[in-house]
Amino acid sequence: MLLAIDAGNTNIVFAVYDGDAQRCVWRCKADNGRTGDEYAAWLFPLFMQEKLEFAAITEAVICSVVPDANFHLMNLCRSRFGCDPFMVSHETVSLRISLDKPAEIGADRLVNALAVLHDYQSPAIVIDFGTATTFDVINDDDVYIGGVIAPGVNLSMEALHKAAAKLPRITIEKPSSVIGKDTISAMQSGVYWGYVGMIEGTLGRIMQELGWCKPLVIATGGLASLFADTITDIDKVDKDLTLRGLVHIYQNRLKQKVI
């Protein structure tokens, strides 16, 4: 079985795959100081609940945007699962990239682009609602040509709470009306409709700049469904896009090794 690890700035996702089938998936809060042994102690009871043993894992693939976590995650794979993990980067994936500095692109964005090419079509735009809200653009020649990085929704809400003494910490949800009748509803409206406007405006400018016919727009990340209900340009929500991209990358690597 394959252990796929997606290490982000807010959460780290661990998923077990048997071939193409997802067996289980777990999330924990990102902590750069957590050691491989600590990850193992957290994972062990979760494996037990699924009637899995660590020995069942024979391969591992890691997508990480947190350099400080890489050593500990690699150590986890080597010491507890007995396998040398495949680390995703612009140098280890078969994706054509048209950027001045390809080394700067986040591994998660590469994985999303490859997942789209494998499971969907091009041209395409991926919107990932993570710690940052990112837009990644793949043209009709299957080339990754760049994108947009904006502050994430939760990051913006936290900044608003910390910067203004009288503003509370709120949860994000679609408000019943644009005009808020109290502080919380006004903040929720500002965050929600502000991001709707940003996403719609950015999508429109990307498509205008490229002069394409309408590309496929896929949203992923925890808040994707919330915004897809309102933004008509979003064609599909795929919450497992990054994990499935990791599986495709590893399977393609195995095929190349056989060849």
Image: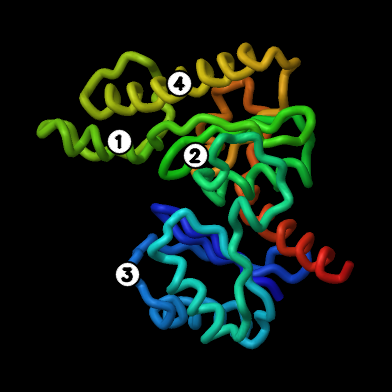
| SS assignment at label 3 | loop
Q: Position of residue 231 (x, y in %)?
A: 57, 22
* Residue in the image at 43% along x and 25% along y: 195
Q: Secondary structure at mark 1?
A: helix
Query: Dot 1 corresponds to which residue?
Result: 157
- Which residue extends farthest left? 165
| Residue sitting nearer the eye, 120 or 66 | 66
Q: Residue at x 35, y 65 (%)?
A: 32
Q: Which residue is mark 2?
A: 129
Q: Secondary structure at mark 2?
A: strand
Q: Foreground: 165 or 139? A: 139
Q: Determine whether 119 is above or below 225 in the image.
A: below
Taking the image as shown, residue 38 lies to the left or right of residue 23, namely left
Q: Amino acid at mark 3?
A: Gly
- Of callouts 1 and 3, which one flags the residue occurring earlier in the amino acid sequence? 3
Q: CA distance from mark 1 to mark 4?
A: 15 Å
Q: Which residue is mark 4?
A: 198
Residue 25 quadrant: bottom right
Which element carries disc 4, helix, strand or loop? Answer: helix
Q: Position of residue 251 (x, y in %)?
A: 77, 63
Identified at 25% across, 29% down, the residue is 184
> Which of pointers 2 and 4 lies earlier in the amino acid sequence?
2
**Image disc number at residue 33:** 3
Type of amino acid under label 2: Phe
Q: Nearer the viewer, mark 2 or mark 3?
A: 3
6 vs 25, nearest the viewer: 6
Residue 172 placed where, x, y %?
A: 38, 36
